[in-house]
């Protein structure tokens, strides 16, 4: 018995072929791979007022990929491909693999405004997002003095649900420390989140 063109198998084959073509088009159009080109960036985190180093602040780098897609709105789709975190040392310094042109760098310590979401957090000497490799960048975080400021700051913090817990453990620990000190319940995050 002969299958009609509208039956399941040929339709599935056409769908697979179209999906494959779209993936090839996306990879060619962006010229990117799933392994991001990264470089080491050095930074220093200081108190915005006193300029004293902030030790034990978490620095979370969130790596994104962007592809051109016929299905995405405006022809582009952005998604998280990886994340890495570190803590600042006693001098407030850190070193981390990072791609400044399209990734997110988040810096947080309880009692301080989160970078870059707090309006008073600053990058000194460079534009936000334009971080040259090999040069130490200074990040100033504002000290939050009232409960209201600290509570508002919690609303500025993204927990990045698409990043596995293992890649953001310090970040979540510091968020929970701040939540508990303000009288909130800690976040409950399963190991796969």
Image (cartoon, rainbow, N blue to C red):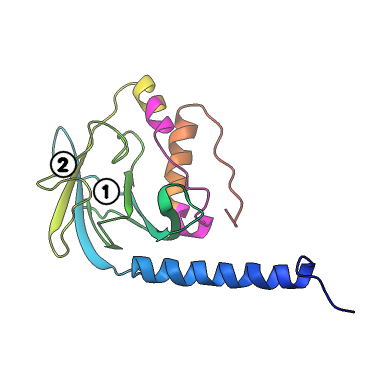
Image quadrant containing the N terminus: bottom right
Q: Mark 1 points at which residue?
A: 55
- From the top left corner, tell me how far across and down residue 72 is, in percent: 48, 51
**Which of the two residues, 192 or 24, is positioned nearer the viewer here?**
24
- From the top left corner, tell me how far across and down residue 40 is, in percent: 23, 66
**Which of the two residues, 81 or 155, is positioned nearer the viewer here?**
81
Q: Is mark 2 on a helix, strand or loop?
A: loop
| The magenta segment | 152-169
Give above or below for 20 relative to 117: below
Q: Is mark 1 on a helix, strand or loop?
A: loop
Q: Residue at x 34, y 41 (%)?
A: 109
**Which numbered marker is on residue 45?**
none
Q: Is residue 11 left or right of residue 53?
A: right
Give above or below for 67 relative to 16: above
Q: Name the residue under label 2.
A: 52
Q: Does the magenta stretch include residue 153?
A: yes
**Which of the two residues, 54 or 8, is positioned nearer the viewer here?**
8
Using the rendered image of the protein, determine whether residue 157 is visible from the camera's viewpoint: yes
- From the top left corner, tell me how far across and down residue 144 is, in percent: 29, 28
Q: Which residue is drawn at 24% across and 68% down?
A: 39
Q: Residue at x 23, y 53 (%)?
A: 90
Q: Name the image quarter holding residue 82.
A: bottom left
* Outermost left residue: 125
Using the rendered image of the protein, determine whether residue 91 is visible from the camera's viewpoint: no
Q: Name the image quarter holding residue 145.
A: top left
Q: Residue at x 41, y 59 (%)?
A: 68
CA gap between label 2 and label 1 equals 9 Å
Q: Do the residues labelled 2 and 1 touch (CB within 8 Å)?
A: no
- From the top left corner, tell me how far across and down residue 173 is, in percent: 46, 46
């Amino acid at each position: 018995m002969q299958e009609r063109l509208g039956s399941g198998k040929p339709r599935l084959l056409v769908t697979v072929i179209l999906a494959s073509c779209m993936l090839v088009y996306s990879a060619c159009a962006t010229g990117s791979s799933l392994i991001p080109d990264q470089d080491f960036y050095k930074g220093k985190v200081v108190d915005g007022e006193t300029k004293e180093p902030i030790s034990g602040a978490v620095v979370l780098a969130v790596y994104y990929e962007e592809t051109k897609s016929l299905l995405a709105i405006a022809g582009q789709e952005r998604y998280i491909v990886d994340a890495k975190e570190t803590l600042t040392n006693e001098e407030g310094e850190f070193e981390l693999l990072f791609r400044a042109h399209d990734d997110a760098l988040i810096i947080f310590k309880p009692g301080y405004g989160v970078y870059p979401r707090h309006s008073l957090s600053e990058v000194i000497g460079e534009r936000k997002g334009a971080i040259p490799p090999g040069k130490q960048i200074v990040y100033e975080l504002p000290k939050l003095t009232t409960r209201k400021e600290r509570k508002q700051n919690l609303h500025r913090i993204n927990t990045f649900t698409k990043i596995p817990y293992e890649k953001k453990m310090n970040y979540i620990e510091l968020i929970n420390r701040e939540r508990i000190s303000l009288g909130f319940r800690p976040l409950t995050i399963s190991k796969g989140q």
